Amino acid sequence: MAPDGLFIGGAWRQAASAFEVLDPATGRVAARVADATARDALQALDAAADAQPSWAATAPRARAEILRRAYELVTERAEALARLATRELGRPLAESRAEVAYAADFLRWFSEEAVRVGGEHRTAPSGDYRIVTARVPVGPCYLITPWNFPLAMVTRKVAPALAAGCTVILKPAEATPLSALALAELLAEAGVPDGVVNVVPTTAPAEVTGALLGDGRLRKLSFTGSTEVGRLLLAQSAGGVLRASMELGGNAPFLVFDDADVAAAVEGAVTAKMRNSGQSCVAANRFLVHEAVAEEFTGALRERLAALEVGREVGPLIDGDAVERVDGLVGDAKRRGAEIRLGGAPHAGPGWFYPPTLLTGVPEDAAITRQEIFGPVAAVAAYPDEPSMVAAANAAPAGLVAFLFTRDLGRAMRVGAALEAGMVGVNRGLVSNAAAPFGGVKQSGLGREGGLEGIDEYLEVKYLAVP
Ligand code: SIN
């Protein structure tokens, strides 16, 4: 039985009411989960604030070993966790298994990083004292995670926070709270002390978030979600001058040059587009293809997408609104002159499926080139040369990830440097890795998650001037 309560101060409790979690593959109720109020959230902050001094004082090695144990438990229970993620996300089990492995990796990576937090010892230029720096935990953190990877987006925040010595209050997305609750149970079993991790699923995110951000004991906000909500949260965080990490929307360009290995580009495109049915902020959003290889690329991509079985290989979208939104983007592109080469209409159901869809000749003014699709729709446009492809890629206000395919190393380096993105995949359609810094530039966010940089988001530099 998966946990379905609030997790506060190391104890499970029910709330005054509960809400339904639906399975997007069937539209049926998958679970009922306790619904936190602002009062519950403040009790979670009480617990996190009380636990903060002792967790910060816990030896880094002890924190590391707890995280390592959590990694081992996630790995041992990978199948059950994958089934749980599939229950709340409706997607194929193979995709959930891949997510669980990805999620576990953040626990392992940050268990290794916990013991490597260093400082500096320098002589001041004047020579009469020393500059000693330490990196200390920020303090209690509020973590808001999205529904699209309900376990990995949680471990990507919780693991570095815990490694750094911070306590947390986690608000998982209300569409997919089950994986986060299961993780809380498992972290407690791994030895995380009471109050260090608190989980408050809620259908009242504005009230819960407002209460926490307005409380002076909170020191940090980390959010993954849309740029629109990220902007509001940044404004709200200004009141308490909170440290903020924002992993916001993308609009990834996928560039295929005339010297690319087209077969490899098609495989990369399928990965970059179809992972999680396109519901990822690093999904390829705009395929910018050199006109010399456009037809070859599009024909082969069409064949690959057409062979994918909806339901078995392509999971559903999160809800009916998502299906409507994606279908609206396809309709808009068609009205503006794009050609539908595959798919292009919602699946009959049951469930909220949209079939793999391929559009060509997508004009730059189509909404689909400016918005995150978050669905299995590939929008292709042809360009005459490298400068026009780079200019089109950089035209978006988002700058999370870009992908480029070329056989020319010089071009890969040149274009990779010119692309306005926090991450660039060269001849591959997936960049995500717990050991790599994930994050964007421009309106795609602030800060990095994972990699050597991920733990810094949860640390402050403290300087001592010592004679
Ligand atoms: C996201 O969609 O927010 C993250 C996906 C990833 O980590 O690969």
Image (cartoon, grey):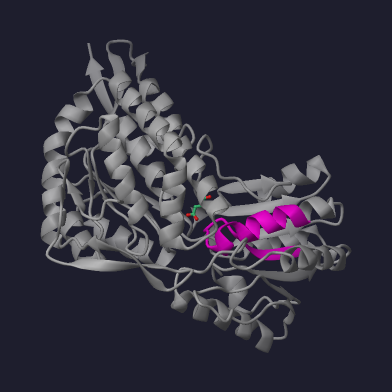
Q: Is residue 278 magenta?
A: yes
Which residue is painted at 62% across and 82% down in the image? 345
Magenta stretch in the rendered image? 266-288
- Residue 206 seen: yes
Q: Residue furthest right?
A: 292
Q: How many marks?
A: 0
Q: In the figure, is residue 42 to the left or right of 356?
A: left
Q: Position of residue 335 (x, y in %)?
A: 66, 89
Displayed quadrant of residue 277: bottom right
Q: In the figure, is residue 378 to the left or right of 157?
A: right
The correct choice, above or below, for 372 with respect to 150 in the image is below
Relative depth, front residue between 208 and 337: 208
Which residue is painted at 32% across and 19% down in the image? 61
Q: Residue furthest front?
A: 1
Displayed quadrant of residue 376: bottom right
Relative depth, front residue between 376 and 424: 376
Q: Is residue 167 magenta?
A: no
- Residue 420 seen: no
Which residue is painted at 76% across and 51% down in the image? 405
Relative depth, front residue between 115 and 176: 176
The correct choice, above or below, for 375 with respect to 58 in the image is below
Q: In the figure, is residue 349 to the left or right of 257?
A: left
Q: Quadrant of the C terminus?
A: top left
Q: Position of residue 437 (x, y in %)?
A: 51, 40
Displayed quadrant of residue 393: bottom right
The correct choice, above or below, for 65 with respect to 321 in the image is above
Q: Residue furthest bottom?
A: 335
